């Protein structure tokens, strides 16, 4: 199974930049999208079906033009779960899960901490999400949590760790949470295969950051420890330019 996670920063904008043609060529079995910023009625679902994805699930935020996640699949899931059941998470459309025969794939959009209020919300979200996943793993041990975590795990995952140490996304408390989350039973699929620096999944639109590769790695495909022996490949796809993020891919045997 080939799975891609992609924060598209507005699915309609991404489509106008060739996203559907790219999707046809990339040809994942499942793609998890974040920050779709649209409702299903605003999305050309027939064009996506024509690209090979008859199974489409959209979970937009209550607020129009904001947040939202989606899963597009070639394979029909056995079950789809919209949200977590935790109200302060779900009204922003941040979690969607599709259960297949021997694994479940989740699209996650973890909040950013753009100000003190949102940072407090982010920490509450992270704590409640950890509890939710701990309980979920009791019945669904084979989880693949794909998405924009809005956190760089280690210094290797950000272009300037010294100057960014007080910026949300690289705060010690955020990094400690992500480290603990991984140690609770998940493999960072990209780092499983690649230990090299200078691999990022998001770049600011300012000051030519992408052209100069001054980026952050905040998009992950985290795979349950129980699936580690089935990891085949994990790569970042920086040549896809429909967003300020790029896609991240994992293949499972």
Image: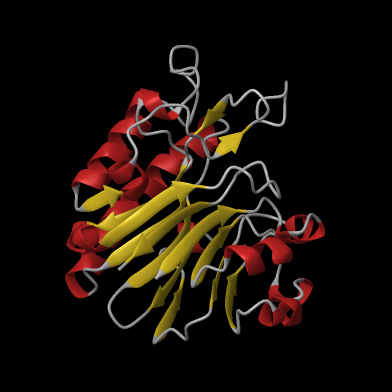
**Nearer-the-camera pick, 168 or 141:** 141
Residue furthest to the top:
162
Where does residue 208 sit, x and y in percent of width and height?
Answer: 72, 24
**Nearer-the-camera pick, 199 or 129:** 199
Vertical arrangement, residue 23 with respect to residue 175, above or below: below
Whether residue 87 appears in this view of the structure is no
Residue depicted at 32% across the width and 33% down the height: 195
Residue depicted at 67% across the width and 50% down the height: 9
Please give the count of numbered marks on the rendered protein. Answer: 0
Image quadrant in which you'd find residue 55 = bottom right
Where does residue 135 sit, x and y in percent of width and height?
Answer: 22, 65
**Nearer-the-camera pick, 135 or 50:** 50
Judging from the image, the colouring scheme is secondary structure
Residue depicted at 39% across the width and 51% down the height: 234
Where does residue 201 sit, x and y in percent of width and height?
Answer: 53, 40
Vertical arrangement, residue 56 with respect to residue 147, above or below: below
Vertical arrangement, residue 217 with respect to residue 108, above or below: above
Name the side, left or right, on which 205 lies relative to 203.
right
Where does residue 229 sit, x and y in percent of width and height?
Answer: 19, 60
Residue depicted at 43% across the width and 27% down the height: 170
Name the side, left or right, on which 16 lies relative to 11.
right
């Amino acid at each position: 199974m080939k799975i891609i996670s992609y924060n598209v920063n507005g699915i309609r904008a991404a489509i106008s930049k060739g996203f559907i043609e790219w999707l046809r060529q990339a040809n994942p079995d499942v793609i998890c999208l974040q920050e779709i910023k649209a409702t299903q009625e605003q999305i050309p679902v027939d064009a996506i079906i024509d690209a090979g994805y008859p199974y489409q699930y959209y979970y937009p935020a209550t607020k129009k033009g904001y947040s939202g996640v989606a899963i597009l699949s070639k394979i029909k899931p056995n079950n789809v779960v919209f949200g977590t059941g935790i109200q302060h998470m779900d009204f922003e459309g941040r979690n969607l899960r599709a259960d297949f025969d021997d694994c479940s794939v989740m699209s996650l959009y973890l909040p950013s901490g753009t100000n003190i209020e949102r940072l407090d919300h982010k920490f509450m979200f992270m704590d409640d999400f950890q509890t939710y996943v701990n309980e979920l793993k009791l019945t669904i041990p084979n989880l693949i949590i794909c998405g924009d975590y809005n956190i760089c795990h280690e210094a290797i995952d950000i272009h300037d760790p010294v100057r960014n140490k007080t910026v949300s996304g690289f705060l010690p408390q955020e990094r400690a949470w992500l480290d603990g989350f991984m140690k609770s039973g998940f493999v960072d699929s990209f780092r499983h295969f690649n230990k090299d620096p200078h691999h990022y999944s998001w770049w600011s639109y300012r000051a030519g950051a992408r052209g100069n590769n001054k980026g952050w790695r905040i998009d992950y495909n985290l795979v349950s420890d129980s699936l580690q022996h089935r990891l085949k490949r994990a790569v970042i796809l920086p040549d896809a330019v429909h967003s300020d993020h790029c896609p991240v891919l994992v293949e499972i045997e």
